Image: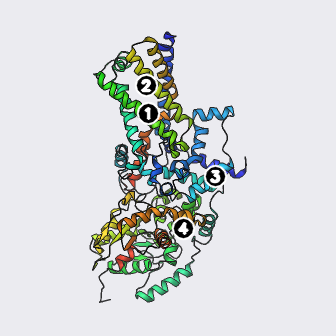
Amino acid sequence: MATFIDGFLWYFALAVFVIGVSGNLVTIILASRKVDLSVPRDSAFSGALRTLFSRFLPDQHMLSRIGIQVVAGYMFHLGLFILLFFAAPHVAFLEENILGFGWTAAPHWLFIVASQFAFLGIIMLWLYRMTNSVSRLISKLDDHVATILTFLVMLSGCLALLESFETLRLLHRFLVELLLIYFPFSRLMHAFTFVPSRLFTGAWFGRRGVDS
Amino acid sequence: MSERLERGLSKLRSQIDPKVKSFFSSCVHCGICAESCLFFTETRDPRYTPIYKTEPLRKVWQQEYTFWGKLASKLGIAAPIAEQDLADWEELVYDGCSMCGRCSMVCPMGIDIAQIIFKVKTGLSAAGFSPPDLAETTQRAVDIGSPMGVKLPALQAQIGHIEEEINLKIPVDVEGSEYMALLSSMEIMYFPEYISALAKIFHQAGVSWTLCSDAFEATNSGLQIGNTEVAGVLVERIVAGAEKLKVKNVISPECGHAYTAIRWEGPNFIGRPYSFKVVHILELLDELLQSGRLKTTGKESSRLTFHDPCSIVRRGGVETQPRHILNAIAENAVEMTEHGAMNWCCGGGGGVSGNERAEPLKLKVFNRKKSQLEELDVETIVTSCSNCRLVIEDGLEANDMEINIVGLTEMLADHLVVDNSQ
């Protein structure tokens, strides 16, 4: 089983992830689009760039009404980013198996803080999704599957690191592989597609001279 | 599958482009858009969540363009989109959305939700699921040239009255003019003072302008109902009029959706660029003021505020110009807390005001504007869209609010330096 998880399934999952994600992005970015025939008032390019970054911050007047989503969203994503790219085992794994170079890993205390942020964030987001009338109405099965899968990957990863137990390591890796296979066909794609979405909309507003 | 369902689905399929794919695949269903929509904030009904209004198109995308959707359809475990699905969304997108585009400004993923809602409208309209009132006005616009049935003799009669009143000639069909002005039916019938304001302003500034007897109507019911073919036909009439008169510029009136139709979407509706430039009346007035061709005198002293029409400001980019103009003629202008590109809609855009069955909902969501106005305690509201003006008038009346409402162009005309030598 260990050979299968560390060997074939890993390469298969990686291939599905890379081919699936790039295929999706190519379809979005390179497919022909209608040319807008109206005369622009301002630059689509600068509008696209502006919106790419401006949407990291919520509208200040709405903050009191969307505080939970914003705070929990930032906690989860920042925590996950640190876990993914700065947890010591991940840095070592990326260096040895994929990139050939590494970087300084986060100290243990930061790992603990980041994981607490990530767990608290994802739990808050999921509870909000289940209890808020709007989120409940618009959420799909995919949203729940993606949340649960991500949660299990995080949980197994933290346990594996803290307990240094081989079975937990294998379970974590197996769940990561499931996530990689599921990723291109799911809502998880937002990790990449938010970029073209913001660029498209920013360009649209930019050529009309609207600061979005 | 019924023929109307097939028409609707076929239209929806044709709307799925790379943008739509990107938008749907990046939506995480966070629901933030709900808090930006006055139809949600004033009713707390989750069905009015902007992204929920795009469900028919999302379903088509999901079932026909995604792995899981295609698999589920192949295995027969996905319920195919039914006629009822389209029928159920008619009220949401036509009555419960003013196409104000506020949702598109706040989506953290950058999804232009308003643009997708318009695409849903095209599908529903193709399937015949649109409000009867809008369908009728659209047909009238195609047959008569005006959604309100305003024909040339009605305009000529108004022109006659105005010329007599202001003692200035209103030029019609003058070939080679620099500008061809467009009007909305509402301006002709309810706010003819807009036409007299144009005449006074252009007279003082020495602008060469004309109206066109074949193409004076700027409103575009095709855009409101989501019928791009009709929208194209209506734009073509304006283009033909402008080309016949060989004008260099066409002036969009103070009507929000008319500006969107002629300035931004028109060339795409007809599939070719124009041979003339399109300017919004406020852009031109600002330019005339800045260049010193217009001279004003005195300032309004009452406490007033400017209501930003969504299609002109948020979706059209004409935000600084009305403020420049207002600052030149008013000394006590105050801004609403959320203004400019983030202003709240009056509630009547996107065809809502022309849809009688949406009247109670329109008045309910006006509460948002009411709160904004109460917060400011103003005596006057200035705006630059005849539709907003009518909707706000209705809202003020329904709420027993004593606030004047005026058009910005007329207010400017009232402050022109009078040339006694004329």
In this rendering, do the residues under marks 4 and 3 share a single chain? Answer: yes
Residue type indicated by callout 2: Met
At label 4, counting other C-alpha atoms closer than 10 Å, the crowd grade (few under 14, some 14-19, many 20 or more) is some
Residue at 50% x, 77% y: name it: B188
Secondary structure beneath disc 3?
Answer: helix
- Horizontal and vertical percent position of residue B292: 26, 74
In this rendering, do the residues under marks 4 and 1 share a single chain? Answer: no
In this rendering, do the residues under marks 3 and 1 share a single chain? Answer: no
Q: Chain of mark 3?
A: B
Query: Cα distance, mark 4 to mark 1?
Result: 55 Å
**Viewer-nearest of labels 4 and 3?**
3
Pointer 1: what residue?
A122
Pointer 2: what residue?
A154
**Viewer-nearest of labels 4 and 2?**
2
Residue at 52% x, 28% y: name it: A182
> Does the image show residue A18?
no
- Horizontal and vertical percent position of residue B419: 30, 86
Secondary structure beneath disc 4?
Answer: helix
> Answer yes or no: do the residues labelled 4 and 1 have beta carbons within 8 Å?
no
Coloring scheme of the render?
rainbow
Earlier sequence position, callout 2 versus callout 1: 1
Secondary structure beneath disc 2?
Answer: helix
Query: Cα distance, mark 4 to mark 2?
Result: 61 Å
Single out the residue that lies furthest toward the right. B2
